[in-house]
Image: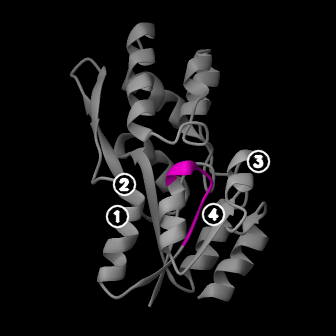
Amino acid sequence: MNIVCLDLEGVLAPEIWVAFAEKAGIPDLMRTTRDEPDYDKLMKFRLDVLRRHGMGLPQIQEVIADIQPVPGAKDFLDDLRAQTQVIIISDTFEQFAQPIMEKLGWPTIFCNTLEVADDGTITGYRMRCDQTKLTTVRALHSCGFETIASGDSYNDLGMIKASKAGFLFRSTVTIKAEHPEIPAYETFEDLSRAIKAAL
């Protein structure tokens, strides 16, 4: 049996940190996993920037409430879910994902958790497991599933390469140049066609 594993931000929804950076006027928070392969380093940097600006979870959630899925994402997801199982595997956090999941029709998501103080300050984060995306697809394989994966960032490469078929979607010029062996697509129509061919 096949399970399609998709990244959330960059594929189905805009980058949450980028949306917040634009709204809050904090350019340092524009950096994402498209730019920084080391997720732990990136998150420590983000939390330090938030502390310096006196920002916390309430301010981020206020921005998330207005974020809409990428145009066409829900139809793409609904079409796939009518044919096979789909799991969103994301390095985002439960506290960020819920409003977006509602707008996408409540698909299954595996993500991480923020540690938040009573005043809303984000004090840390808990990753579900090491190399969450790669570890998750390997766990699915151990249960007898085959995976087909798609994402846009450095932290998606592990699950893409470990899957029986994997695709980049709206990725950066740099990542596509570094990984010419991975088919890359720019539209949901083309990605859907590639996924269905691999089912």
Circle 1 sits on which residue?
Answer: 135
Q: Quadrant of residue 179?
A: bottom right
Q: Is residue 113 left or right of residue 2?
A: left
Label located before the other in sequence (3 or 2): 2
Of the numbered discs 4 and 1, the one sitting upstream in the chain is 4
Residue 83: x and y in percent read 57, 86
- Where residue 118 appears, x then y in whole percent? 21, 21
Q: Tell me the element at label 4.
A: helix
**Mark 3 = which residue?**
173
What are the residue bounds of the magenta stretch? Answer: 149-155
| Mark 4 or mark 2: whose residue is earlier in sequence | 4
Residue at image coords 38%, 13%:
51
The amino acid type, in three-letter code, at marker 4 is Lys
Question: What amino acid type is highlighted by mark number 2?
Answer: Gln
Neighbours of disc 4 within 10 Å: few (<14), some (14-19), many (20+): some
Query: Which residue is under mark 2?
Result: 131
Q: CA distance from mark 3 to mark 2?
A: 24 Å
Camera-side residue of 158 and 144: 158
Please report the residue visible at 42 percent of the width from the left and 8 percent of the height from the top: 52
Is residue 146 toward the left or the right of residue 19 in the image?
left
For badge 3, the amino acid type reads Val
Residue holding disc 4: 74
Q: Using the rendered view, name the quadrant where residue 35 is placed.
A: top right
Instruction: Determine whether 7 is above or below 191 in the image.
Output: above
Tell me the distance, in whole angstroms, between the alpha carbons under discs 3 and 1. Answer: 26 Å
Label 4 or label 1, whichever lies nearer to me, is 1
- Density class for disc 3 (Cα within 10 Å; few <14, some 14-19, many ≥20) is few
Say left or right for 111 vs 30: left
Residue 46 magenta: no
